[in-house]
Amino acid sequence: MRHGVGWREQWRRNRKGLAMSTAIIGLGNIGARLAKNLAAGGQKVIVADRTLAKAEKLASELGGNAQAMPVDAAIAKADVIILAVYLDAIKQLIGTHNLAGKIVVDPSNPIAPDGNGGFKKTIPAEQSSGQLISSLLPASAQLVKAFGTMSAQSLASGANRTPERAVLFYATDFPRAGEVVANLIAASGFSPVAVGRIDKSIRIEVGGDLHEYGKLGKLVSVNEAKLVV
């Protein structure tokens, strides 16, 4: 993508058959598994981490569908940026990198160990990391909350489930950006289901009623999802 090309121009290019490029920033449990799922689904992805050697190792394991880059270069090049890092790291990346005109995907969950073997929320109970991140992004960035509704283990075991695919929920204020991310969800081996605007992202974060570790408590099919969305 040329520097300064906006999201609408990216969308027009995509509609003409020029595929949008996707970068995964952060190669922990979620980021690495997502890269594997997308590469297995035929998607070309850029993988980036604080340590370039880590990205290069993963890219070599994934073959021709993955390319390793430093974080700065990956963000500059890609149209879709999946920030598969902790919430505080996302805030830092937003403050130090130009995300204008990008589709930004947020899988984060605002939790930390509580010291008693469990987890606690790190922001007020009524807030979501999706809404928080939305308020920090430049106006031309398009945020989609996705890929954080289940554990890395379930992202692995649930991909391409038969006879009915498991659902990955997403939320966004931008329908066309949502379509782009829905295509990535499908390529990764899941069925995309929208839950509404970004103010609904709390439902698909840890503790929310549609999260695997919330009230939902399990992976669901599309038909099952229709009963709860």
Image (tube, rainbow, N blue to C red):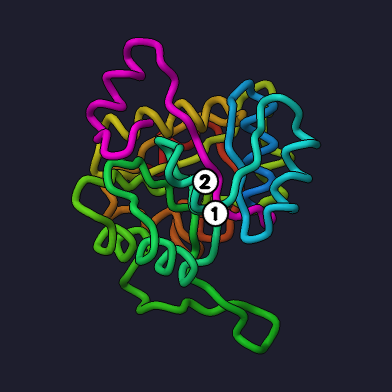
List the residue tagged with mark 2: 147
Q: Name the secondary structure under disc 2.
A: loop
Q: Amino acid under label 1?
A: Ala
Q: Is residue 45 visible?
A: yes
Within 10 Å of disc 1 (Cα), the crowding (few <14, some 14-19, many 20+) is: many
Within 10 Å of disc 2 (Cα), the crowding (few <14, some 14-19, many 20+) is: many
Give the magenta range. Answer: 1-29
Q: Nearer the viewer, residue 164 or 23?
A: 23
Q: In the rendering, which numbered label is found on residue 197? A: none
Q: Position of residue 114 (x, y in %)?
A: 60, 85
Decide which of tag 2 and tag 1 comes sooner along the chain.
1
Name above or below for residue 34 compared with residue 86: above
**For the N terminus, which image quadrant?**
top left
Decide whether residue 76 is among the magenta residues.
Answer: no
- Give the residue drawn at x 19%, y 51%: 139
Q: CA distance from mark 2 to mark 1?
A: 9 Å
**For the C terminus, which image quadrant?**
top left
Q: Do tag 2 and tag 1 residues touch (Cβ < 8 Å)?
A: yes
Choose top left, top right, bottom left or bottom right for residue 126: bottom left
Q: Amino acid under label 2?
A: Phe
Q: Name the secondary structure under disc 1.
A: loop
Q: Tell me if 162 is positioned left or right of 103 in this view.
A: right
Q: Nearer the viewer, residue 58 or 105?
A: 58
Q: Position of residue 169 (x, y in %)?
A: 45, 42
List the residue tagged with mark 1: 84
Q: Nearer the viewer, residue 227 or 16?
A: 16
Q: Is residue 216 visible?
A: no
Q: Position of residue 54 (x, y in %)?
A: 74, 53
